[in-house]
Each structure stands twice: as structure tokens, then as C-alpha cells.
């Protein structure tokens, strides 16, 4: 197996900088669209053979150095008792709003083996199929990001209801965060036991908080998750979107790898995180709409700056967009492999 990605996560020597792309399995790929044409997104996530097939698509098409389980961060939310649907226009819509104590009380603490057996099965199929290829990354949403979906009922612009609960009923907010934290720990442990060789925690909405609120109400839960998972001895990646203002706190999370978005220069991020951290990122997903020559230039710049860190895994600064030309994603991976080679 090509274990370059795992070695880079641990800050070990690598022959070249590994690359994978957030949301690499998805709508920009005609092969995904073909499978998705007849099957609802959530059904895809819950059908191990199909989820495994989709996970493998970008490994073969792009030549990336890691596979990420095809699923969604909201799968455990559903397992906690909040049913949901995905609308093509508006993204996820949750059928219940979690805004008071009785609603939080009612949330089930899921047992992944009973409540999300399809995730375990998908991972097992994938490990078998990826044997001679690349490592498999498992993932979960971070408690704060999951809490925003539960409280807002879907996406949001200002996260008013989330912040209102945080500010006006901090005890209830912490009670919800505590339940989500325990869920994330058990969910990721089960993924690792089933065969995930690294895990990524997605904190898509962390950047909407002030550094103070992030430090007080988000970081402690993250630290707990990461310290509990350290026992499992696989690399833990923490990706906080829009992280520039909170990097000083993010550094304290204890994650092996810190994912960074594109709004900060990677050189500045490394300065803030210190040279003992492995970084992942940070190409603007829209850079994939530039010419191939310009993509190469941006890749070289990020690779060059990334050398200052203990290790670097190339990635986008957030998920690949559905409109992305596949050939440009292929060109990106080729450019990283070409210019990220260590002689
Ligand atoms: O990275 C991968 O390829 C693995 C699969 C994956 C998906 N979602 C598939 C998906 C992963 C890791 C996620 C994580 C996820 N899901 C996050 C965190 C990462 C991020 O992008 O910030 C969030 C916030 C979600 C919630 C979610 N799921 C939204 C807001 C949406 C709708 C908008 C969108 O980007 O599509 C989804 C749907 C979704 N998740 C799709 C896929 C392939 C599209 C579903 C379809 O085919 O209609």
C-alpha cells in the first residue's frame, strides 16, 4: 500500500507530498452522477456496496494518495433521532429543531454497531478493496458544527439560534455539546476499529465564532475527543473552516494534523501553528477554474511555503465544487506529485 499520506500525517519522511481533496467523491464526477441518478443521496450513504464504489472513484480517476469514506457528517445526527432530508437547492433540512431541554433529552446516544452498521460494512469492504492502493480516512462532524445543524434545522447565515442558545442558555448548549462529543468519540472509535486508518473531524462552522467563544465553548470538547481517540493510535486531522482568527486556539486541540482553508496564506498559518505541526490544505477550491499553468503556479507556491511545517498534506481549503472540471482536478494531483517530490 502507498502509505505516503499516513507517514506525512505522522511527520515522517516522505518521498513526495501526498494529496487528497475534500469532497473528492461527489457531484463533479460523471461517474458519481451516474450512480446517483437512480439513488437518493442518503440511500447511497446507507448502501455499503455503492458507498464503497463511490469512495473508490476519485482514487482511480484522480490518483489521490488517500480515500475518504463516502458518507455525510449528518448520518450520526439521524442516528440520534433527528430525521433529515437533502434538498438539491437548500442542502440538508432537519425535521426537528433542537432548541430546548426536552429536545436535547430526547436525543439518543447512538450505538454505531446497531444504528449505523452500514458505515462499518462500507469501511470493511473498502479496506479489502484498497489493500494495494491507499489508506482510508474515516470522518465525523465536530460537535459545534453538528450542533449548528441541529439548532438551526439546516444551513444558516448568521447562526443566530445557535449563538442565542450559547449566550442565553449556556448550560443547555453545553449539555448538547456533551451529548454530541460522546457520540463523536464512539462513532470515530467504531470507524477506526472497523479499519479507518486516519480520521478527520470537520468543523465547517467553527470560523463563525469569536476566538473567545471558540476557546470557551468549542475547544474543550474537541480536546476531549482528540485525547480519547489518541488511544486508537491513528492520525487525527482537525479541519476548522475559516480558521485564521482562531488558529492560536486550534493549535491547542492536540490534533496530529491541522487542516486550513484558503483565506489565510499557508506561510502565516504555519507561523501561527508552529513548526511542530503537520498542516493540510490550502488551495482555494475556485483555483481549479484557472488554467492548468496557473494551477501549477499556485501549487508550487503552497508546496514551497508548506516546507516550513513539520509535514504537509496537500488539499483544497474546502470541498471541491460540483462545477469543477475533472481534468483540472487531475492536473492538480499531477502537479502536486511532480513539484512536491523530494529528491
Ligand atoms: O469528502 C468526501 O468525498 C466524502 C464524502 C462527504 C460528503 N459530505 C458527501 C456529500 C463528506 C466528508 C461530507 C462532509 C460534510 N457534509 C460536511 C463537512 C465538510 C464541508 O464541506 O464543510 C458538511 C457541512 C456536510 C453537510 C452537507 N452534506 C451539506 C451542506 C450538503 C449539501 C451541499 C453540498 O455541498 O452538496 C451535503 C450533501 C452532500 N454530502 C453531497 C455529497 C457528495 C451531495 C449530495 C448529492 O449528491 O446530492
Image: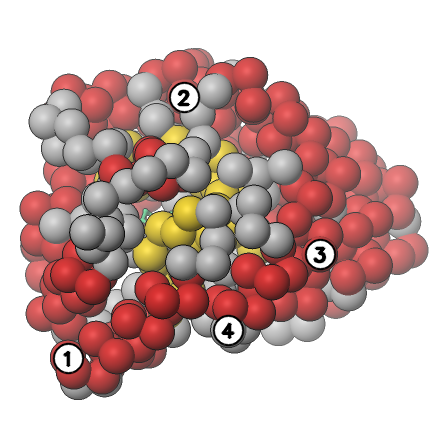
Whether residue 143 can be seen here = yes
Whether residue 112 can be seen here = no
In the picture, the disc for residue 292 is 1
The residue indicated by pointer 2 is: 192
**Cβ–Cβ under 8 Å for marks 2 and 1:** no
**Cβ–Cβ under 8 Å for marks 4 and 3:** no
Which is nearer the N-term, disc 2 or disc 1?
Answer: 2
Tag 2 secondary structure: helix
Percent across and percent down for residue 251 are 65, 49
Label 1 to label 4: alpha-carbon separation: 21 Å
Q: Nearer the viewer, mark 4 or mark 2?
A: 4
Percent across and percent down for residue 155 are 55, 63
The residue indicated by pointer 3 is: 248
**Cβ–Cβ under 8 Å for marks 2 and 3:** no
Residue 273 left/right relative to 286? right
Q: Nearer the viewer, mark 2 or mark 3?
A: 3
Decide which of 257, 224 is in the foreground and name it: 257
Label 4 to label 3: alpha-carbon separation: 15 Å
Q: Residue at x 26, y 79 (%)?
A: 297
Q: Is residue 56 above or below residue 94?
A: above
The residue indicated by pointer 4 is: 265
Label 4 to label 2: alpha-carbon separation: 32 Å
Amino acid at each position: 500500500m502507498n502509505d505516503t499520506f499516513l507517514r506525512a500525517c505522522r511527520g515522517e519522511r516522505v518521498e513526495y507530498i501526498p494529496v487528497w481533496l475534500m469532497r473528492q467523491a461527489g457531484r463533479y464526477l460523471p461517474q458519481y452522477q451516474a450512480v446517483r441518478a437512480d439513488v437518493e443521496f442518503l440511500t447511497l450513504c446507507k448502501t455499503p456496496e455503492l458507498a464503497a464504489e463511490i469512495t473508490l472513484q476519485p482514487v482511480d480517476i484522480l490518483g489521490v494518495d488517500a480515500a475518504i469514506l463516502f458518507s455525510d457528517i449528518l448520518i450520526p445526527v439521524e442516528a440520534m433521532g433527528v430525521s433529515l432530508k437533502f434538498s438539491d437547492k437548500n442542502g440538508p433540512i432537519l425535521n426537528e429543531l433542537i432548541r430546548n431541554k426536552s429536545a436535547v433529552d430526547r436525543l439518543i446516544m447512538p450505538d454505531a454497531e446497531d444504528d449505523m452498521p452500514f458505515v462499518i460494512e462500507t469501511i470493511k469492504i473498502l479496506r479489502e478493496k484498497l489493500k494495494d492502493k491507499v489508506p482510508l480516512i474515516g470522518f465525523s462532524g465536530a460537535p459545534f458544527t453538528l450542533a449548528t445543524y441541529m439548532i438551526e434545522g439546516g444551513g444558516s447565515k448568521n447562526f443566530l439560534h445557535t449563538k442565542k442558545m450559547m449566550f442565553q442558555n449556556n448550560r443547555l448548549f453545553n449539555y448538547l455539546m456533551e451529548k454530541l462529543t460522546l457520540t463523536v468519540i464512539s462513532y470515530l472509535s467504531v470507524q477506526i476499529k472497523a479499519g479507518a486508518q486516519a480520521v478527520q473531524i470537520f468543523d465547517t462552522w467553527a470560523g463563525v465564532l469569536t476566538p473567545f467563544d471558540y476557546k470557551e465553548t468549542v475547544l474543550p470538547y474537541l480536546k476531549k475527543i482528540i485525547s480519547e481517540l489518541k488511544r486508537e493510535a491513528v492520525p487525527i486531522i482537525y479541519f476548522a473552516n475559516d480558521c485564521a482568527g482562531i488558529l492560536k486556539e486550534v493549535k491547542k486541540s492536540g490534533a496530529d494534523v491541522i487542516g486550513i482553508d484558503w483565506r489565510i496564506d499557508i506561510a502565516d498559518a504555519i507561523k501561527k501553528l508552529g513548526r511542530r505541526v503537520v498542516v493540510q490544505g490550502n488551495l482555494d477550491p475556485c483555483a481549479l477554474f484557472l488554467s492548468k499553468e496557473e494551477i501549477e503556479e499556485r501549487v508550487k507556491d503552497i508546496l514551497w511555503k508548506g516546507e516550513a511545517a513539520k509535514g504537509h498534506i496537500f488539499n483544497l481549503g474546502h470541498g471541491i465544487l460540483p462545477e469543477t472540471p475533472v481534468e483540472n482536478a487531475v492536473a492538480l494531483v499531477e502537479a502536486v506529485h511532480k513539484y512536491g517530490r523530494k529528491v
